[in-house]
Image (spheres, rainbow, N blue to C red):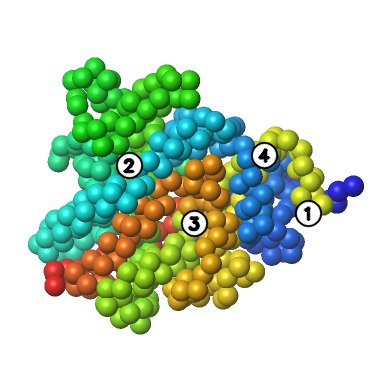
């Protein structure tokens, strides 16, 4: 006999979720004194959960599936149709292997070498400018970096448009009206463009180097031996480009953390890789990025004496788990040192999802994110000088994704 799950009274709480953003699940976990509760979203029963034990259950492929979980507005903007995030079972494993084959030391070094070169070019350009809006500038060089790594050739006069389209994909899922449609239109444009490139690769008209992502994905085969269809390859190439551009969000918070914690900046001047890693991990833990992820209950089961019914939409609280006092001491204090003794767990620290990389749905690009952030941290601390004039550095816990309101204005940038 199972117990009654704590539940939020009312007909529908979609508007509350939009109004409270990153704190929606965490607020209710606190008020219910429970890591799991029931609510109603988009007119249907939904379960929200958070914490380490909840993450372990959520990433159990026997209990939850991704098929049919992501709302259509997310598929049409952020993920794309038939992308790796929407798959389960053998199909998911096959596609995830394709992504994880890029996360070798050799490939990650190739990525960081490109990032260093682009940082150098960006710093030279910024020196000539009175001031820059860091969020916008950094997205552009991340787009250049991603395209070079992927083997996708983009003309200089096209890079700004592509950057704006990739940005629209990750800024529009939670938006309403014109801003949301901007994301849908951007995805349609980029999918069409990359689809045409893949057609030319398969016809032999374009011949990317064998090690490139464009080559690997164009010739990747399904478990049954057939080639992926053009549309799906385009979606998965975008699943490389878009998340790399989205690292701009973390990088803005990196600048904010350096600005607010000058004592941490001093520690980083030694150039110690371990200090860089701890700082990067704390930026990823502390600041808002993804609020939650969705799945559906695969079959009826009981957990913590509560019944989970097949087909129920379930949200896992990423932000709240990274701020859970049962896992983290003083979670609302920025303290990179907490990662010095940290015992790595795939379920307690989940800024980009949790669980296993290959068999589960943890973000394949997490290592790439960390490496690009470390390169950038070295540049910000040891390679350039800059000033942060007075501006609105506050950020919203409601807007998804959240970035400092001023997008960080920098002036008087000089290379050291």
Q: Is residue 257 left or right of residue 194?
A: right
Compare marks 3 and 4 and give the one earlier in the sequence: 4
* CA neighbours of label 4 inside 10 A, class few (<14), some (14 to 19), many (20+): few
Q: Residue 212 in the image: x percent, y percent? A: 26, 37
Secondary structure at numbered mark 4: loop
Read off the residue under disc 4.
62
* Tag 1 residue: 304
- Direction left: furthest residue: 128
Which image quadrant is residue 19 in?
Answer: bottom right
Q: Give the labeled residue for mark 2.
A: 241
Circle 3/circle 4 CB separation < 8 Å: no
Q: Is residue 227 left or right of residue 108?
A: right
C-alpha distance separating marks 1 and 2: 40 Å
| Separation of residues labelled 1 and 3 (CA atoms) | 25 Å
Residue ranking furthest to the top: 203
Going from N to C along the chain, the mark reached first, 1 or 3, is 1
Instruction: Nearest to the eye among marks 4 and 2: give it.
Output: 4
Q: CA distance from mark 3 to mark 4?
A: 23 Å
Q: Position of residue 336 (x, y in %)?
A: 44, 73
The mark that comes first in sequence, 1 or 4, is 4
């Amino acid at each position: 006999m199972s117990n009654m799950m704590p539940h939020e009274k009312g007909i529908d709480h979609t508007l509350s979720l939009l109004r409270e953003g990153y704190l929606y699940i965490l607020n209710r976990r606190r008020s219910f004194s429970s890591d799991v509760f029931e609510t109603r979203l988009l007119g249907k029963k939904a379960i929200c959960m958070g914490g380490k034990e909840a993450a372990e259950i959520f990433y159990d492929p026997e209990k939850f599936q991704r098929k049919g979980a992501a709302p259509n507005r997310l598929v049409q903007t952020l993920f794309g149709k038939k992308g790796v995030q929407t798959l389960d079972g053998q199909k998911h494993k096959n596609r995830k292997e394709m992504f994880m084959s890029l996360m070798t030391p050799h490939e990650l070094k190739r990525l960081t070498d490109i990032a260093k070169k682009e940082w150098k070019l960006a710093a030279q350009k910024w020196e000539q400018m009175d001031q820059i809006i860091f969020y916008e500038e950094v997205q552009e060089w991340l787009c250049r970096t991603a395209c070079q790594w992927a083997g996708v050739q983009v003309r200089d006069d096209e890079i700004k448009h592509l950057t704006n389209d990739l940005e629209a994909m990750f800024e529009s899922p939670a938006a309403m009206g014109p801003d949301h449609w901007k994301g849908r239109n951007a995805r349609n444009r980029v999918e069409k463009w990359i689809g045409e490139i893949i057609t030319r690769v398969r016809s032999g008209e374009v011949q990317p180097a064998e090690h490139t992502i464009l080559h690997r994905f164009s010739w990747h085969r399904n478990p049954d031996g057939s080639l992926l269809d053009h549309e799906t390859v385009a979606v998965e190439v975008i699943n490389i480009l878009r998340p790399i551009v989205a690292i701009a969000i973390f990088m803005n918070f990196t600048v904010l953390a350096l600005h607010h914690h000058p004592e941490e900046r001093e520690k980083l001047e030694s150039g110690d890789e371990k200090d860089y890693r701890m700082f990067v991990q704390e930026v990823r833990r502390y600041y808002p990025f993804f609020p939650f992820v969705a799945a559906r209950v695969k079959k009826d089961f009981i957990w913590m004496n509560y019944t989970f019914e097949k087909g129920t939409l379930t949200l896992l609280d990423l932000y709240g788990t990274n701020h859970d006092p049962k896992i983290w001491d003083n979670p609302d204090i920025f303290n990179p040192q907490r990662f010095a003794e940290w015992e790595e767990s795939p379920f307690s620290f989940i800024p980009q999802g949790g669980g296993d990389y290959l068999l589960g749905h943890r973000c394949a690009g997490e290592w790439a994110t960390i490496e690009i952030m470390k390169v950038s941290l070295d540049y910000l601390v040891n390679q350039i000088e800059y000033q942060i004039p007075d501006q609105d550095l506050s950020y919203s816990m409601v807007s998804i994704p959240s970035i400092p309101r001023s997008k960080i204005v920098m002036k008087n940038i000089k290379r050291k």
